[in-house]
Structures are given as C-alpha cells and as structure tokens.
Image (cartoon, rainbow, N blue to C red):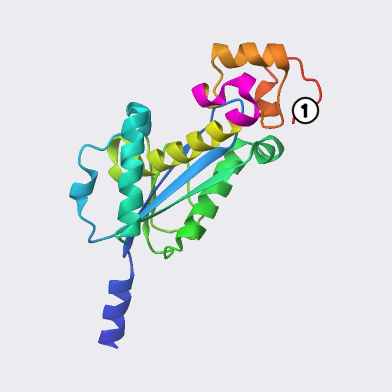
Amino acid sequence: MLALLRGIIMYKMRYVVGIDEAGRGPLAGPVAVGAVSIPLGFDKLFFKSIKDSKKLSPDDRELWFALALEARKEGVLDFAVSLVSEKVIDRKGISYAIRLGIKRSLLALGVPEDSQVYLDGGIKAPEQFRHQLTVIKGDEKIPIISLASIVAKVIRDKKMVRLSKKFPEFNFDMHKGYGTSLHRQALKRYGPTIIHRRSFLSHLDTPCPSDRR
C-alpha cells in the first residue's frame, strides 16, 4: 500500500504547462493557441532572458522558436500550436475559439490532467486540469508562458505570410491581419477576403461584396 501511495505521489504534477494565445485582435486570419510542456526537472536556465513575444523582435522570436524546436527534438520539452479559423471565430466568437485552441493544444501534447498549468490573462484550461492558474500579464512573469506566446506568435505569423501570397494586395506579411491603416485602406479598396473575420469588421466603414477567394 505504501509503495502504491509513493507511486501516485511521483506520478502527480510531473509536468508544468504554459499556455498563451496570439492573434486575438486581428481583422483577418486565425487565432493561435500555444502550449509548452516541460518536466519538473527541466533546466530553468533555458529560459534565461526570455520575454513576452510582443517585446521581442521578429528575429529574436525566430531564435527562441528555433531553440524550442531543438529542445523538442532532444526530448527535453514539447509544444503544440492550434490554429482556429476565422470561420469558427465568426460563428462561435473569439472566446470560444481560444478555448477550443487550448483544448486542442493540450490534447496534442497529451499531458496528464494532474499537470500544473499556467495560463496568461483571462484564459482557462478545461476544468479537468485541476491544477491551473491564470496569471495577469503571465507572458511577462512566467517564462513557460512567455515561450508559449512566442511559439504561438511565430506559427501564426508564418501562416499569415503564406496567406499574403494568396492575397498580395493585402500585405498580410507586413501587418499579419491586424487593423493597421494599410490594412484598412486595402479593405476599403478591395473589400474583405474569405479569411477576414466578418464579426470584427462590423464596426468598420467597409464595403462587403461577395468573398474574394
């Protein structure tokens, strides 16, 4: 019996997970949810000098992404990014889309439900993850959330760069779908594409002809 109890104690909380999203506010494209999983014995020096993705240059984000890929290849950490489409956002809302992305990313990682999960801002993991903590500005305070924000941002940006080739007049490679003046000017001139979030355009003075494919 004692050995069984020891086994249960050792099993619990073997992993720490950080979760963050990227792309909550853009007018076009998917929202991305990143989740990073590390074992409890992970060398914390790996996170030295890491920052929230919004405070890093694109080159620095790419460097951290490359480090994360190498660490995953070596089996010392794992991460997953779920992209939830603009269609789901329009149909169900951005909060639902983020919850769906969280669920998908955790499922992809396959972490035990007894893992310690840290989340940024106001987002939450499914309720079966009992040991979860949502931290305001967690992407600035908790390194594993910072890394989650970086992998989510890099994956989403790569997606928007690919989409810019399909819709070159919108320059998605430059603004990644956010509501910059350049993006708004293109919307007024060309109208929205099939990757625009119609629910996010309702407050804009933007004509809405049939979807451009």
In magenta, the rendered stretch is 164-174
Residue 30 spot, x, y in % from top left:
59, 37
Q: Is the magenta stretch mostly helix, strand or loop?
A: helix
- Asked if 206 appears above or below 107 in the picture, the reply is above
Residue 21 spot, x, y in % from top left:
47, 39
Q: Residue at x 22, y 48 (%)?
A: 46
Q: Is residue 165 left or right of residue 35?
A: right
Residue type, numbered disc 1 = Asp
Q: Can residue 118 be seen in this view?
A: yes
Q: In the displayed orientation, state which residue is furthest to the left.
A: 45
In the rendered image, residue 166 lying in the magenta stretch gets the answer yes
Q: Is mark 1 on a helix, strand or loop?
A: loop
Q: Residue at x 54, y 54 (%)?
A: 104
- Asked if 77 appears above or below 122 in the picture, the reply is below
Q: In this view, does 49 lie to the left or right of 114?
A: left
In the rendered image, residue 2 lying in the magenta stretch gets the answer no
Q: Nearer the viewer, residue 47 or 96?
A: 47
- Quadrant where the C terminus sits is top right
Residue bearing the label numbered 1: 211
Q: In this view, does 50 lie to the left or right of 22?
A: left
Q: Residue at x 20, y 41 (%)?
A: 48
Q: In this view, does 133 lie to the left or right of 142?
A: right
Residue 64 spot, x, y in % from top left:
31, 41
- Quadrant where the N terminus sits is bottom left
Name the image quarter holding residue 188.
Answer: top right
Q: Nearer the viewer, residue 28 or 40?
A: 28
Q: Is residue 204 visible?
A: no
Give the class, few, some or many, for how many residues have Cα within 10 Å of label 1's Cα (few <14, many ≥20): few
